Image (spheres, rainbow, N blue to C red):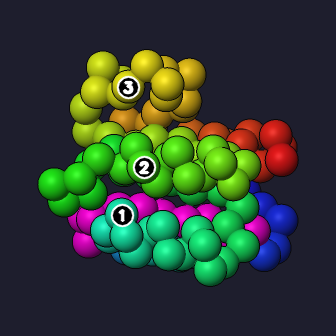
């Protein structure tokens, strides 16, 4: 299960073990991986790098990732949310956005990213 070489995925996640797992998995199937643990850091990465797709944990520390999701939409970067909670935490404007619940099913995650990339 590999992806086109060179696609860049932004992982906005503040849990170190989840981050390491995602970095290993995603780089192992051919993604370039950028990791941000804070909203400001993630916004900088989106502005400075050519990001193809993003995985946004709904909560980064005390902040919600919704401003980052808004910026991804503005830049036409497809994204999905991840959470240990259900979609009831999503504002109405994101109710149509795919959400993966933690713990991840890795095949489902890769399939979801590939589906998002197919929309570009």
Q: Is residue 11 above or below residue 33?
A: above
**x, y (%) of residue 113?**
65, 48
User: Looking at the image, is 89 positioned above or below residue 63?
Assistant: above
The numbered mark at residue 67 is 2
In terms of secondary structure, where does tag 3 sit?
loop
Query: Real-space Cα distance between discs 2 and 1?
Result: 8 Å
Of residues 11 and 74, which is closer to you in this image?
74
Query: Which badge, 2 or 1, is on the more N-terminal residue?
Result: 1
Q: CA distance from mark 3 to mark 2?
A: 11 Å
User: Which residue is pictured at 54% across the width and 31% down the height?
Assistant: 98
Asked if residue 11 is among those painted magenta in the image, a careful observer would answer: yes
Q: Are marks 3 and 2 in contact (CB under 8 Å)?
A: no
Which stretch appears magenta? 7-16
Count of numbered circles in the view: 3
> Which residue in the structure is indicated by mark 3?
91
Residue 79 x, y percent position in the rendering = 59, 46
Q: Circle 1 is placed at which residue position?
A: 39
Secondary element type, mark 2: helix
């Amino acid at each position: 299960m590999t992806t086109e070489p060179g696609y860049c995925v932004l992982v906005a996640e503040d849990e170190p073990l989840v981050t390491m797992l995602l970095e290993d998995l995603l780089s192992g199937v051919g993604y370039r991986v950028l990791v941000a643990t804070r909203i400001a850091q993630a916004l900088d990465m989106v502005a400075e790098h050519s990001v193809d797709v993003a995985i946004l944990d709904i909560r980064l520390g005390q902040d919600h990732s919704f401003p980052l999701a808004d910026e991804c939409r503005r830049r036409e970067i497809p994204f999905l949310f991840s959470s240990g909670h259900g979609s009831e935490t999503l504002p109405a404007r994101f109710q149509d956005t795919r959400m993966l619940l933690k713990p991840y099913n890795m095949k489902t995650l890769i399939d979801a990213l590939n589906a998002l990339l197919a929309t570009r």
